[in-house]
């Protein structure tokens, strides 16, 4: 990593401070936190894809020992407001418990509160719900094209969003281009499925008017949403941020769980807890990810230069509209990937169906879009008989063209795509991988090489909100840090959200240590609760290195300035003559003339008579950071500056397939990765490795499959397959550093790395392997069973033809 | 029913419902919360404990079935307050985790592996952890951690049987 050496602590291979507690089993996960007198919730769920709730008989369940309360949707709907949604769709209300109509199999209908979770589950089995099954729709195209079955009748259609953007001279470019190509690509419904399910304990104190919330949450504006739905002031909601979250990758957004428990605790007067079991998590946890159908058309010339693109993305968001339709909006900020496509038409369509509700998933819609783009680049090469790597090189934005404005109005901050591609190919030559592929083919296996060149928009300026819902006028996405030096000189810094494994405490310590030139290990990093917190946009949009790291940098810089000012005053020298060195301030003309850290602490804390006039005593500073490039609404013609930074990744892989059973194996995996300045190499490597594993899962194994009755048939880990250590290959990462001009250390985001390109690379490698058979597939996940059937059919056809 | 369990070298008498899993018993009745519930159907391995030295899933065992066996949890392999074993330290050195939820189980699996086989190949490490799902790391830094721990333990100035 070439930025090494410029920094004292940033980019050095330091340990992650959070790790110590985890290796000893001393993480503080939500299920580990037990408040006195806590009661437990279990849920009764709808067995139908859609049904009217005709009657609920609670009597048998209520009579069981240890059962305290049974809550239905009517009572909850009367007492609370619907959950916040992203789009302006008032007739698609979403509530924790189904009210009158249940709209997917597994939707929560009744909540049972009992002394233990086991007793609550026992009682849930005795609740009798009378349902009248209703017609249902599962397929997005059917939901879009027909109004025969409406998921929400009052909304009048199944369409939540249908917006077409045209950026540049699309028609003209299409007319002028000698060649066109159409492609349909499917991204199957999967998710990140953390090993810890969502959990929450809500505890209402009527004597303090305070709802204490401990939750495994990763979501912006959590406390606001709780307060609004429960109709209490936000000052009566205290979300505890010192809860370790056992994995999230976007989906830990249990707002409905929290409203449910919050209501019950206020109603019943004791702490109420709901820890999802795996079944609840998979069916009714509302944590499914994108299920997207792409129709792509590109116009290109004989050299493979892609001039223009039309893309329709149709998203099946499930039964209710949360924030998930916005996942069609974020890709606008990288809609052309790393390529110089000069005009784009993008139609984003979101429909409701009778499937589980979606929420945000790692990459927020970018990974599916990248599959569509990268499959298209491969097909352009194939049609022209050109090499797939060469096509990419020809279309990529060159280093000297940055900052580069893409048709949708977003400026890419920096990049050096060709250099990173060259580095990867120098590490493992194309010829050697082709030879290896051909050797596998000679052995009777199918084998293919896959490329994917993808961007990771990072920094989380959530402009897709205002782009897709003009009522939302948000042009900021803040993060904050507060630093206090105590009376004996130790430093405590704050962060104002939970983390789910990204090492944010390490990040804050490193950034402050770098600025103050002080060992980061000596800096305490704490997480005050929401009432003691400054604004935080939370760990979404690959933003924390940029925004929390940035806020910590700026707060530390303010502290450094204050220390220097106090010292200059006390030394009787002008400010510009004062130099700062590892916590001490000296006279540049007379370096032995200096004030130590403890001298300055003494002055600030106790000797106010030695302070500059009008300066606040003490050494407390804070900084609320505005997102770089933020502050600008989308234009009327739909141009928008989405995220401030774009990381780049280039995947280069070899896959072999056993043609008899159709089982793919990833033989070689190389990835070039450029996320600007790396703050902590261990963390960045882990993010990329984990992202690739997720991507392999989405490409080959993971799918929330439904049968024709609308039943989720992959609802345990026996049938929703997660990659184990056997499925994840050795991965070699080749680094390149192109600093961002928009951030304090030149850092960009890396939290979604790997995941954004791995599915595309795997799909491309499999298609390269299938090419000799004359078949292809553009539908993910490419499961063993499907691949085996496809290969068998092609071979049969071939042998018959012969 | 009344049961007697040997947990981390200590005998504990407990009153449990027969249907209580060992996992729930450890977490709810003994406050040994290092074992985590992930799937509760024996796939993810987050609840792993050592059962007479063998890594098993505490969610698939009823507490009464654990009588007469030596149960070791993550709390039992941690040398002391604030003090890490060689394996735990190696996980920190390679950052063989992110969220930490599957980590105690991974450490226990590594423990069981290295007691049996002080010099595992990469493939043997991959096999050993293949029953434990990690959604964060893609496994690479976990594999590195176990290989590093093995190397350090082999170099430890202690009799072989006391190294892990």
Image (cartoon, coloured by chain):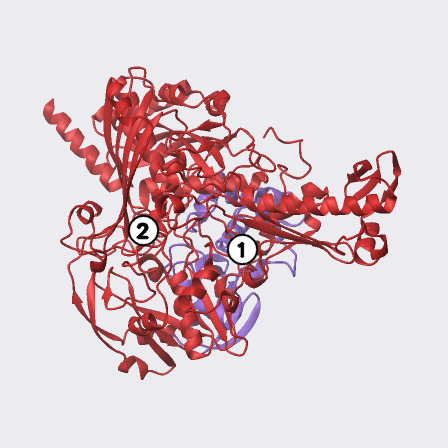
Query: For mark 2, does the 10 Å Cα neighbourhood hold few (<14), some (14 to 19), or many (20 or more) residues?
Result: some
Query: For mark 1, does the 10 Å Cα neighbourhood hold few (<14), some (14 to 19), or many (20 or more) residues?
Result: many
Q: Quadrant of residue A709?
A: bottom left
Picture coordinates of residue A371, whole percent (x, y): 33, 35
Picture coordinates of residue A224, whole percent (x, y): 46, 61
Quarter of the image for the N terminus of chain B: give it.
Answer: bottom left
Picture coordinates of residue B52, whole percent (x, y): 49, 61
Which chain identifier belongs to the red chain?
Answer: A
Give a yes or no on whether discs 1 and 2 share a subunit.
yes
Q: For this rendering, which residue is in front, A595 or A691?
A: A595
The chain holding disc 2 is A
Q: Which residue is mark 2?
A: A720
Q: Report, in whole angstroms, how far the alpha carbon at label 1 lies from the one at label 2.
A: 31 Å
Which chain identifier belongs to the purple chain?
Answer: B
Q: Which residue is mark 1?
A: A497
- For label 2, the SS is loop
Picture coordinates of residue A220, whole percent (x, y): 47, 54
Asked whether, in this view, residue A632 is left or right of residue A785, the answer is: right
The chain holding disc 1 is A
Q: Quadrant of residue A670?
A: top left
- First-in-chain label (1 vs 2): 1
> Would you say residue A289 is visible in this rendering?
no
User: Residue drawn 52% across and 34% down?
Assistant: A675
Asked whether, in this view, residue B148 is left or right of residue A301, the answer is: right
Asked whether, in this view, residue A151 is left or right of residue B55, the answer is: left
A370 up-or-down from A315: above or below? above
- For label 1, the SS is loop
A22 up-or-down from A665: above or below? below
Specify the label residue B132 is tagged with: none
């Amino acid at each position: 990593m070439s930025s090494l050496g410029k920094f004292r602590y940033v980019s050095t291979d330091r340990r992650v401070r959070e790790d110590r507690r985890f290796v000893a089993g001393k993480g503080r996960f939500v299920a580990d936190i037990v408040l006195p007198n806590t009661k437990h919730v279990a849920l009764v769920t709808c067995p139908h894809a859609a049904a009217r709730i005709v009657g609920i008989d609670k009597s048998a369940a209520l009579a069981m020992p240890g059962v305290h309360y049974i809550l239905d949707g009517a009572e909850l709907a009367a007492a609370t407001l619907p959950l916040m949604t992203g789009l302006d769709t008032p007739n698609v209300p979403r509530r924790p418990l189904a009210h009158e109509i249940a709209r997917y199999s597994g939707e929560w209908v009744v909540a049972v509160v009992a002394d233990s979770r086991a007793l609550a589950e026992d009682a849930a089995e005795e609740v009798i719900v009378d349902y009248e099954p209703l017609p249902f729709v599962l397929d997005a195209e059917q939901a879009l094209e027909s109004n025969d079955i409406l998921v929400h009748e009052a909304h009048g259609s199944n369409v939540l969003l249908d917006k077409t953007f045209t950026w540049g001279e699309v028609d003209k470019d299409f007319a002028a281009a000698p060649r066109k190509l159409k492609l349909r690509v499917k991204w199957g419904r999967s998710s990140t499925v953390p090993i810890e399910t969502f959990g929450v304990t809500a505890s209402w104190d009527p004597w303090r008017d305070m709802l204490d919330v401990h939750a495994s949450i990763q979501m912006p504006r959590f406390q606001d949403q709780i307060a609004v739905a429960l109709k209490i002031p936000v000052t009566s909601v205290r979300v505890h941020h010192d809860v370790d979250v056992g994995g999230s990758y976007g989906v830990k957004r249990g707002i409905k769980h929290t409203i449910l428990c919050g209501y019950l605790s206020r109603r019943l007067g004791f702490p109420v807890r709901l820890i999802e079991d795996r079944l609840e998590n998979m069916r009714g946890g509302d944590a499914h990810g994108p299920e997207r159908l792409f129709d792509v058309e590109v116009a290109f010339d004989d050299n493979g230069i892609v001039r223009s693109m039309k893309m329709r993305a149709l998203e099946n968001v499930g039964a209710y509209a949360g924030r998930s339709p916005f996942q069609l909006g974020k890709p606008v900020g990288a809609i052309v990937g790393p390529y110089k496509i000069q005009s784009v038409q993008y139609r984003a369509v979101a429909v409701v169906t009778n499937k589980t509700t979606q929420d945000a998933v790692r990459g927020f819609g970018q990974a599916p879009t990248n599959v569509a783009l990268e499959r298209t680049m491969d097909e352009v090469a194939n049609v022209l008989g050109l090499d797939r790597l060469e096509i990419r090189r020809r279309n990529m934005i060159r280093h000297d063209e940055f900052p580069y404005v893409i048709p949708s109005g977003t400026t890419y901050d920096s990049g050096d795509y060709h250099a990173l591609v060259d580095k990867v190919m120098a590490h493992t030559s194309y010829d050697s991988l082709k030879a290896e592929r051909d050797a596998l083919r000679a052995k009777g296996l199918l084998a293919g090489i896959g490329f994917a060149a993808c961007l990771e928009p990072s920094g989380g300026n959530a402009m897709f909100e205002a782009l897709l819902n003009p009522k939302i006028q948000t042009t900021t996405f803040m993060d904050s840090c507060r630093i206090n030096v105590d009376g004996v000189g130790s430093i405590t810094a704050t962060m104002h959200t939970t983390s789910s494994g990204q090492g944010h405490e390490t990040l804050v310590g490193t950034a402050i240590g770098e600025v103050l030139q002080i060992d980061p290990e000596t800096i305490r990093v704490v997480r005050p609760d929401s009432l003691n917190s400054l604004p935080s946009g939370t760990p979404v949009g690959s933003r924390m290195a940029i925004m929390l790291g940035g806020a910590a940098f700026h707060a530390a810089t303010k502290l450094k300035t204050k220390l220097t000012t106090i010292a200059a005053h006390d030394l009787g020298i002008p400010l510009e003559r004062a130099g700062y060195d590892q916590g001490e301030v000296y006279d540049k003309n007379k370096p032995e003339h200096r004030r130590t850290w403890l001298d300055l602490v003494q002055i600030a804390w106790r000797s106010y008579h030695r302070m500059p006039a009008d300066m606040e005593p003490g050494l407390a500073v804070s900084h609320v950071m505005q997102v770089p490039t933020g502050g600008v609404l989308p234009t009327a013609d739909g141009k928008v500056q989405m995220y401030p930074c774009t990381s780049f990744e280039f995947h280069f892989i070899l896959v072999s397939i056993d043609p008899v059973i159709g089982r793919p194996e990833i033989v070689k995996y190389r990835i070039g990765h450029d996320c600007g300045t790396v703050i902590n190499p261990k963390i960045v490597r882990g993010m990329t490795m984990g992202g690739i594993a997720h991507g392999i899962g989405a490409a080959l194994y993971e799918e929330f499959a439904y049968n024709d009755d609308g039943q989720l048939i992959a609802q345990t880990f026996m049938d929703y397959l997660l990659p184990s250590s056997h499925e994840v290959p050795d991965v070699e990462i080749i680094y390149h550093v192109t600093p961002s001009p928009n951030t304090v250390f030149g850092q960009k985001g890396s939290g979604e790395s790997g995941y954004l390109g791995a599915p595309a690379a795997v799909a491309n490698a499999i298609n390269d392997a299938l090419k000799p058979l004359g078949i292809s597939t553009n539908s993910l996940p490419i499961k063993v069973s499907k691949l085996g059937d496809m290969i068998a059919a092609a071979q049969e056809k071939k042998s018959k033809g012969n | 029913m009344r049961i007697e369990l040997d947990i981390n070298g200590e005998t504990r008498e407990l009153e449990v419902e027969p249907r209580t899993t060992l996992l729930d018993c450890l977490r709810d009745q003994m406050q040994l919360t290092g074992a985590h519930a992930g799937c509760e159907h024996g796939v993810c391995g987050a609840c792993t404990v050592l059962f007479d030295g063998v890594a098993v899933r505490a969610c698939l065992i009823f507490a009464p079935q654990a009588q007469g066996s030596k149960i070791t949890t993550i709390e039992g392999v941690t040398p002391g307050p604030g003090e890490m074993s060689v394996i735990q330290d190696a996980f920190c050195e390679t950052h063989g985790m992110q969220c930490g939820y599957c980590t105690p189980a991974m450490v226990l699996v590594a423990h069981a592996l290295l007691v049996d086989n002080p010099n595992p190949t990469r493939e043997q490490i991959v096999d050993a952890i293949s029953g434990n799902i990690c959604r964060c790391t893609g496994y690479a830094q976990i594999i590195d951690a176990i290989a590093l721990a093995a190397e350090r333990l082999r170099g430890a100035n202690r009799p072989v049987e006391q190294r892990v």
